[in-house]
Amino acid sequence: MSAHQRGTELDLSWISKIQVNQPAVLRRAEQIQARRPVKKEWQAAWLLKAVTFIDLTTLSGDDTSSNIQRLCYKAKYPIREDLLKALNMHDKGITTAAVCVYPACVCDAVKALKAAGCDIPVASVATGFPAGQTHLKTRLEEIRLAVEDGASEIDVVINRTLVLTGQWEGSDFIKTSTGKETVNATFPVAIVMLRAIRDFFWKTGNKIGFKPAGGIRSAKDSLAWLSLIKEELGDEWLKPELFRIGASTLLADIERQIYHHVTGRYAAYHDLPMS
Amino acid sequence: MAATRAGSRACEIFTALEYGPVPESHACALAWLDTQDRHLGHYVNGRWLKPEHRSSVPCQDPITGENLASCLQAQTEDVAGAVEAARTSLENWSTQPGAFRAQHLTRLAKMIQKHQRLLWTLESLVTGRAIREVRDRDVPLAQQLLQHHAVQAHTQEEALAGWEPLGVIGLILPPTFCFLEMMWRICPALAVGCTVVVLVPPASPTPLLVAQLAGELGQFPGILNVISGPASLGPVLASQPGVQKVAFCGAIEDGRALRRALAGQGPELGLALGAESLLLLMETADVDSAVEGVVDAAWSDRSPGGLRLLIQESAWDETMRRLQARMGRLRGGRGLDGAVDMGARGAAARDLAQRYVREAQSQGAQVFQAGSMPPDSPFFPPSLVSDLPPASPCTQAEVPWPLVVASPFRTAKEALAMANWTPRGGSASVWSERLGQALELAYGLQMGTVWINAHGLRDPAVPTGGCKESGSSWHGGPDGLYEYLRPSGTPTRLPYLSENLNYDTFGLAVPSTLPAGPETGLSPAPPYGLFVGGRFQAPGARSSRPIRDSQGDLHGYVAEGGAKDIRGAVEAAHQAAPGWVGKSPGARAALLWALAAALQRRESTLVSRLERHGVELKVAKAEVELSVRRLRAWGARVQAPGCTLQVAELKGPVLRLQEPLGVLAIVCPEEWPLLAFVSLLAPALAHGNTVVLVPSGACPIPALEVCQDMATLLPGGLVNVVTGDRDHLTRCLALHQDIQALWYFGSAQGSQFVEWASAGNLKPVWVNRGYPRAWDQDAEGAGPELGLRAARTKALWLPMGD
């Protein structure tokens, strides 16, 4: 995310004018998933594309350097080489978009990626993730430390107290959720957010990115997210600078689907490298 | 080398991220056509019929033009044979207990479930519509319809006591959407015990398949018979002995022609016409969701017609921008592709759209077309027409598929005026996040169905129908059942056609009246004049007609009303309408009761008037007493209109509103001059209509007596009574374009004329076909049938929440 948003004057009248009809948005969410199936070669190619949008994530209390290292290796080699070869996609440099870890693991991740010889960015959740209910001072300090350790992207948890009282903050990307809630990335919520991104672009010319996170586990889900972006925002948003998927187990399922596409057989999990 | 080719393709797709084809195999549809050797006949009485020496029509894939099969064109004998089969099985089917019929319908639902892939691939293949819509919506809906109506059949004896099945039903279907339209109508008909003959346009195999599935249930093969033939066989179907009702669904002009052709024929006619819909977008709407509503309405293969789109001026730019952006993402292609929004519908639909677009452009309109669509025929891109001059012919014409015609409005009031400024009244949606405003508009729209913040939702439990030229027949919900029922004991309908009736001259001339001898007079003298706008007025023609008593003595003159008086009466009735509709049910009931009390006070005068006309004293007293009772009874039946319907998978209520028809014209019978007059007037008023009545011709005096009370009690114009030559007045009323319904009780010829003339504005008519009615019996004089005929239904959808 090189070009940062310069931002624009906060105009709350934009927000107060927005109307959202919930049942209608729910109907649209159902429709999008049913109306744009992607099959065969298209499915394989779309899935590979989805890989390049993944923020490969581990956010566990017991993360250590060994599993971070494994994660980083998987980020560099997300799909088994022979499978990519079969699709003639082995020389396209397919990696995930980033790895995403807790601030304390940033150092490990940067080191591991360096060792693997690649320039995948390290993203860190910061600012009192996942609740964001810490002091502004410690939150800012957390960001500073993560950046010092080599993180180039920060997923900030905004202070929802401020949001709920109408005091918004700006950003380059907006994310559906932390992935730590009971309900995370859902289509209806995404539709509302994507329409807001489009309206903002139409008003200011600034493109804001979008990252759904949490609960996106199957290859089929990832295809639905891609077509949602394509339908609501258009192809120009389908690049890692503007679209990410926050996920930990999604990649394994995508790899299995590619395996099936190439070999015609369904893979066992142990047929493919662990992340 | 195949792997490398696939590989390079993967790279290409990876870069461009385009959608690919998702073809649905239609092998089973072709295999089914093969079972008939690609030659489809009729399906009658559980068997395929392929009579010889019939011309045949090719059934083509509308997209590739490939010949799929040949279909027969039925001739008169085929129609007669199918009706015969339906008539034979009627006795057995209609006398089964409802619970038994329910089981049979459930079995058919299961049969459809088992063969759903065949159904949806066949339907998509031959109609060209997007398979997603057929598979995910039409076929499940067909099963729901059967299940819903099975439940209705199960409870029929209890819930519909006092009603019996009509008999053999003839159903005439349009070329597109015939499978689903057929299901909407056969389900209620079969559920209540009718049997059906369906006339489908040739090259529509899906209804034949449904008939075959029903036939393969084994029992009752003759209840559903499908013949393929041209719509011109409609009158032939109607004239077959035993056919009690013809339900027609299709284009407005075809419906009009059928209405004329069937005047004086045996069957009742139910029309569901036109395909255009309306979307009303307020500035307070969720515009993006409303744009999706437009897609649902016009560009998703969900509805047969186009859309009129009314946009509040302040939201115009924003809406057009979003709409155009959304159009760019629509995908068209072969219907059997699972990822297209729109298929193609054959050359006729394309040409119709093309003609409209060309004409609109020549009248100065802007046309925006977008979407990824194969460029060649038979595809037609989604089109948005704007800046159409208000007075151009295109604004009056029905908008065809797949067009959207957008126009701006300034205020909610103006929106309503523009929305209702059309002869059609099918379905509409209102988009606004302001509840009060949305409801106000929904209630004000003259439409059969109104959705708030949604478009195109359907459910078997919700009646769907229309008003004005969209026809007044219903399918689904309770109203759909009554379409195929009649009050128990009603005589079978037979043709009463009078071949020599000249529609051009019927009731045209009024015989001139001359002084007719010494007046023996009535005491006190009844008021002279027509009762129009709340007072007695001299007739426009300034002439009078003599009224004689039972001895043949002249006892006075009544005013001779004519065309101008009818015009004045209808105007007065329209002016009184908003006030009367706006009154609370309680206030309406109070006025009917006050009128009852006034009638009671006038009893002695009324009795003496009736006696002068040869009615026995005892009978005359009973007539007055019964009239008073009728007014009281209908006063008590004035309820807050509407009830709530339960719809599966929808949060929020659907309201079934009972709205007044508008201005209702009633030609009263000659017999029971007071009782019939009151029995017809009371339900009309109770349901909020304003009325123009023609009283008994031989004995109009009692009605005029009642007018004296109405002059003091009721708002002016609510009830208007015009005396005169009945045929002449009937002609004026039947040809009047701004009367919303007409009830006629008179001669067979008059009934036939009324049916013929009603084709003008397609007003619903109720005629007695020359038969007398037992007005003194509650079943015929005050039964629920009168209430059903005095109101029209509107379904109002209010989706909410998650």
Image: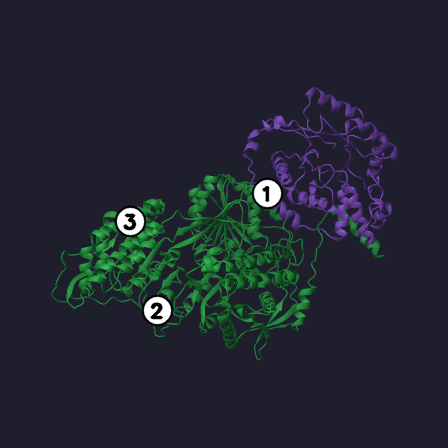
Image disc number at residue A25: 1
Residue B273 visible in image: no
The CA span between labels 3 and 1 is: 50 Å
Where in the figure is residue B520, as x and y percent of width and height?
12, 63
Quadrant location of the C terminus of chain B in the rendered image: top right
Instruction: Check the residue under mark 1 and report the chain it is in.
Output: A
Q: In this view, does A135 lie above or below B159?
A: above
Q: Chain B is drawn in which colour?
A: green
Where in the figure is residue B103, as x and y percent of width and height?
56, 62
Give me the residue at 71% from left, 28% from top.
A129
Q: How crowded is mark 2: few (under 14 residues within 10 Å), some or many (20 or more)?
A: some
Q: Is residue B659 above or below residue B669?
A: above
The CA span between labels 1 and 2 is: 55 Å
Q: Decide if residue A258 is on the left or right side of residue B740.
A: right
| Residue B354 quadrant | bottom right
Q: Which of marks 3 and 1 is in front?
A: 3
Residue sitting at the far right: A115
Q: How crowded is mark 1: few (under 14 residues within 10 Å), some or many (20 or more)?
A: many
Q: B387 or B661, which lies in front? A: B661
Residue corresponding to mark 2: B503
Residue B705 visible in image: yes
Q: Which amino acid does label 2 sit on?
A: Tyr
Where in the figure is residue B339, as x and y percent of width and height?
67, 53
Q: How crowded is mark 3: few (under 14 residues within 10 Å), some or many (20 or more)?
A: many
Label 2: which secondary element:
loop
Q: What residue type is labelled 3?
A: Trp
Image disc number at residue B593: 3
Q: Colour of chain A?
A: purple
Q: B651 or A82, which lies in front? A: B651
The CA span between labels 3 and 2 is: 41 Å
Q: Decide if residue A169 is on the left or right side of residue B424.
A: right
